[in-house]
Every structure is written in structure tokens, then in C-alpha cells.
């Protein structure tokens, strides 16, 4: 008979994120067993009704669905290698941040031990877990995604990216690349106006609506890249964009501000111009960044262990 409280779940790792995941499941009525390397961190969850396993072996034996939210790829192996023989037939949903190849390595390792594997990438902060703003990306076994959906959907909007276990991580890190580069640009801009005494708070208020509006440019660039015609009319040329970047670099230097983030982009643009593409659209910068067509799903997995 189906447990009316929902499936039992084991949660490994009770840092900020693992605790949020476990709390959300408890609040939804699931039976939750928790384990943490430092046992004291389980106290709050025990008080809320979780079962605190005294050993990792007991934790993975408690429920067929095991969720790992540890620090990194190495900590997943360090935690589960000693008990993986006892996990045969279980399901592992790994929400620990890893690189795509590390996720693929874990999927292969799990399959080798008869463990069903789904990799996940959390696009949320701990307080967002269980709210409509949270999103979690998944890749690996479609069957696991479908079977675990009643649990996964407690935390966030769940998106399945494909059978290649590395895809969720790849999307996650690609989006974080955009985010961190944008933050570096914001900090650089704050330093520029900070050179004349403007506070970062005022700059944030001024910059937010403008930069938010500029994200509409993603779709325009994407259209050009996917169409492959960097010479089509209506595009801002690389030469024009280089001039704009050179103004920013020079203004930074004049104000005594380190131009490193914008100078790095300018260097890529200059390389495209030197190769003869100055009159083409600025989306052509993509050509300086993209991978060649070798199979990047297979490289260097062996070096991960
Ligand atoms: P914390 O630093 O708060 O917690 C880390 C957890 O990993 C702790 O439970 C810690 O145990 C455990 N751990 C670390 N090393 C080992 C090890 N060698 N063996 C066993 N356990 C270990 O991190 P978060 O909870 O914030 O993050 C967990 C995962 O979630 C990370 O991969 C992170 O990238 C990802 N994530 C976090 C987000 C966030 O906003 N916090 C957002 C998106 C993803 P102990 O208590 O014993 O130190």
C-alpha cells in the first residue's frame, strides 16, 4: 500500500542546501532519514521529525530513494564508496554541484554497482527551496526522473534535460557563467563611478533597469548565431563594438580603475577583427568561444577518480 505521507527519502548532507531539501520534505509529510558527516547538524531536523541515521550504511539502507547534497564530486565518492555495495537496487539523486564529466563519471560508477542514477543541478538558494521561484535541472535516467517526480516537485520546478547525465550540470554552469560575468561587469561599473564618490547602492539602483532591459539582446544574438549569418544587415559591427569597449577601457584607466573584465572581452573582439571580421556583427564573438566539434562528453572522465 502507498504510504499516505509520500515516499520515504534519505537525505545525505545537511549543509544549508541539504537541510532546506530535508525540511521541505518533512513539511510535506514524507518520512525522511538524514545523515551528515558532522552528526550535530542533524539535531534540528531530528526535532522536526526526521530520523537521524547513526551511520552512512544505515542511512542508505533506510529508503530506496537516496538524495545526496554534499560539497563536491570528491565528497560524494568519499561518502558513498564504502557503502555502495549495499545500495544495489536503490536510486541515487545527486544534487551536489559537479562538472558535467564528474556527473557522467558518477552515473557510470552508479550503473556499475546496480544503482539507478539521476543528476541534478539546483538553480536556487536554500530559502527558495519549496517556492515557485526555485528551479532544479535533471539529467540521466528518465525513468528515475519520472518515478521520483512526486518528491522532486516538492522542492522546485523540475526540468529534465536528457539522458546524458552531464547535461544538467552543463546548463547550470553555463547559466552561472552568464551570471558571474554580469556580476563582474556590475562590480567594474561600480568601481568606475565609485572613483568619483558614487555609492555602489546608487549605482545598483541606476544600473538594474538598464542591464535588465539589455537581456533582450540574448534573443537577438541567439537568432544570429543559430542562423550562422554574421554579415546579415541590422547588426552592430565588431568594429563599432570594439570602439565602445576601447572607450570603457580608457575611461577606467583615466579614473584609476582596473579594466580587467571589459579588457578581456575587448581582447576577444580585437582577435576577431584581426582575423578580418570587423564589419560583421558582434555576435561573431561566439566564434572565439565555442568548442570545436570533438566529442566533449567523453574527455577526461578517467582522470576524475
Ligand atoms: P554547505 O557548505 O552548507 O554544506 C556542505 C555539506 O557537505 C555539509 O553537509 C558537509 O558536511 C558536507 N561535506 C563536505 N565535505 C564532505 C566530505 N568530504 N564528506 C562528506 N560530507 C562532506 O553547502 P550547501 O549545503 O550550501 O551546498 C551543498 C551542495 O549544494 C553544493 O554542491 C552546492 O554547490 C550545491 N548548491 C548550493 C546552493 C546554495 O545556495 N547553497 C545553490 C545551488 C547548489 P559537514 O557538516 O560535516 O561539514
Image (cartoon, grey):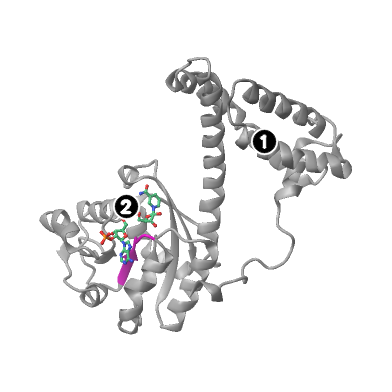
Gap in Å between the C-alphas at discs 1 and 2?
36 Å
Element assignment for label 2: helix
What span is colored magenta in the figure?
A: 65-71
Give the answer, above or below, for where 19 lies relative to 133. below
Measured as percent of width and height from the top left, residue 274 is found at 85, 41
At a point 66% along the width and 33% down the height, the residue shown is 217
Does any atom of ligand 1 lie closer than 8 Å to the CB of label 1?
A: no
Measured as percent of width and height from the top left, residue 187 is found at 51, 31
Q: Which mark is residue 287?
A: none
Q: Nearer the viewer, mark 1 or mark 2?
A: 1
Residue 45 belongs to magenta span: no
Element assignment for label 1: helix
Quadrant in which the N terminus is drawn: bottom left
| 10 Å crowding of disc 1: few (<14), some (14-19), many (20+) | some
Mark 1 and 2 residues: CB-CB less than 8 Å, in contact?
A: no
Furthest-right residue in view? 276
Name the residue tied to disc 1.
Answer: 263
Give the answer, above or below, for where 217 lies relative to 124. above
At a point 51% along the width and 72% down the height, the residue shown is 304
Measured as percent of width and height from the top left, residue 179 is found at 52, 41
Q: Which mark is residue 17?
A: 2
Q: Nearer the viewer, residue 164 or 5?
A: 164
The answer to whether residue 138 is left or right of residue 59 is right
Q: Nearer the viewer, residue 130 or 300?
A: 300
Amino acid at each position: 500500500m502507498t504510504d499516505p505521507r509520500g515516499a520515504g527519502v534519505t537525505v545525505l548532507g545537511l549543509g544549508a542546501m541539504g537541510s532546506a531539501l530535508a525540511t521541505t520534505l518533512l513539511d510535506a509529510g514524507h518520512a525522511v532519514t538524514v545523515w551528515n558527516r558532522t552528526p550535530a547538524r542533524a539535531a534540528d531536523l531530528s526535532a522536526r521529525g526526521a530520523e537521524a541515521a547513526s551511520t552512512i550504511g544505515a542511512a542508505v539502507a533506510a529508503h530506496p530513494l537516496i538524495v545526496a547534497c554534499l560539497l563536491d564530486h570528491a565528497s560524494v565518492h568519499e561518502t558513498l564508496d564504502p557503502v555502495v555495495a549495499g545500495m544495489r537496487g536503490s536510486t541515487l539523486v545527486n544534487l551536489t554541484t559537479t562538472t558535467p564529466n564528474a556527473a557522467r563519471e558518477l552515473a557510470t560508477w552508479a550503473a556499475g554497482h546496480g544503482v539507478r542514477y539521476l543528476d541534478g543541478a539546483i538553480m536556487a538558494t536554500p530559502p527558495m527551496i519549496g517556492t515557485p521561484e526555485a528551479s532544479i535541472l535533471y539529467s540521466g535516467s528518465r525513468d528515475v526522473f519520472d518515478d521520483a517526480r512526486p518528491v522532486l516537485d516538492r522542492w522546485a520546478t523540475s526540468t529534465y534535460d536528457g539522458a546524458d547525465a552531464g547535461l544538467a550540470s552543463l546548463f547550470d554552469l553555463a547559466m552561472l557563467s552568464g551570471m558571474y560575468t554580469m556580476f563582474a561587469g556590475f562590480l567594474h561599473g561600480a568601481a568606475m563611478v565609485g572613483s568619483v564618490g558614487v555609492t555602489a547602492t546608487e549605482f545598483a539602483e541606476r544600473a538594474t533597469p538598464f542591464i535588465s532591459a539589455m537581456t533582450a539582446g540574448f534573443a537577438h544574438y541567439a537568432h544570429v548565431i543559430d542562423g550562422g549569418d554574421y554579415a546579415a544587415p541590422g547588426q552592430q559591427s565588431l568594429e563599432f563594438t570594439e570602439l565602445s569597449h576601447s572607450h570603457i577601457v580608457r575611461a577606467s584607466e583615466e579614473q584609476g580603475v582596473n579594466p580587467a573584465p571589459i579588457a578581456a572581452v575587448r581582447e576577444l573582439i580585437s582577435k576577431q577583427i584581426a582575423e578580418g571580421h570587423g564589419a560583421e556583427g558582434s555576435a561573431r564573438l561566439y566564434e572565439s568561444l565555442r568548442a570545436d566539434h570533438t566529442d566533449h562528453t567523453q574527455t577526461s572522465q578517467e582522470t576524475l577518480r
